[in-house]
Amino acid sequence: MDILSFSTIAENIKKEISHRCGLNLSQTRILLYFQQNNNTALKMGDLATYLKISLSTLSRQLQQKKTMELVTITRSETDSSKTVALNQAGLKKVAELKKTLTEIEKTLFASSTDQEVTEFNRIFNILLNKTASQNHFKQ
């Protein structure tokens, strides 16, 4: 197996999301996080932790013009923290993104049986769990 093919598949999916939804990877990750968590407002530091990125990286991502159109950032009245949640445009965009992801998935698995898709998902989740539990690959 050519393990680097995962990168090719990921790049093609990112290009398709960009083409159909006008989103980059960081915007996609932010939208999907909030979609999966019922758009619960979060402090920026907590969001950065959940996305596994630094606070400064998240701050830069949130300052992108397109991202700013999709989120509401509220400054705390009691401390220096800021809270982030999707606004109406973000909720609309996440619905568009989910539809696009479903269409991409259907295209990728068009010639596969339900059993093959189930087995692929099982193996893929095992691989994800293994790589997520390791900080780096051991040689």
Image: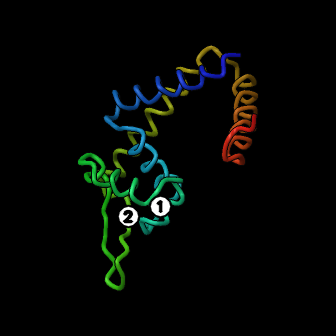
Q: Residue at x 34, y 27 (%)?
A: 19
Mark 2 Cα shell of 10 Å, populated few (<14), some (14-19), many (≥20): many
Identify which residue is drawn at 47% across, 26% down. 11
State the image coordinates of residue 5 (x, y, percent, origin top left).
Answer: 59, 20
- Position of the N terminus, as image quadrant, is top right
- Residue denoted by label 1: 47
Q: Amino acid at mark 2?
A: Val
In the rendered structure, are the residues bearing label 1 and label 2 in contact, judged by CB atoms less than 8 Å apart? Answer: yes
Q: In the visual, does 74 lie left or right of 29?
A: left
**Quadrant in the rendering for residue 110:** top right
Which of 86/79 is in front? 79
Relative height, residue 116 to residue 138 (above, below): above
Q: Decide: few, some or many residues near mark 1? Use Cα within 10 Å; few <14, some 14-19, many ≥20.
A: many
Q: Nearer the viewer, residue 15 or 7?
A: 7
Q: What residue is drawn where x is 47% and y is 48%?
A: 32
- Residue 48 at x, y = what percent? 47, 59
> In the rendering, at what x and y percent does residue 111 appear?
62, 14
- Badge number at residue 21: none
Q: Which residue, given by chain and number where applicable, does mark 2 sit on? A: 84
Specify the amino acid type for callout 1: Leu
- Residue drawn at 23 percent across, 48 percent down: 65
Q: Residue 33, image x and y in percent? A: 49, 52
Screen quadrant of the C terminus? top right
> Where 116 falls versus 40 (above or below)?
above
Q: Which element carries disc 2, helix, strand or loop? A: strand
Which of marks 2 and 1 precedes in the sequence?
1
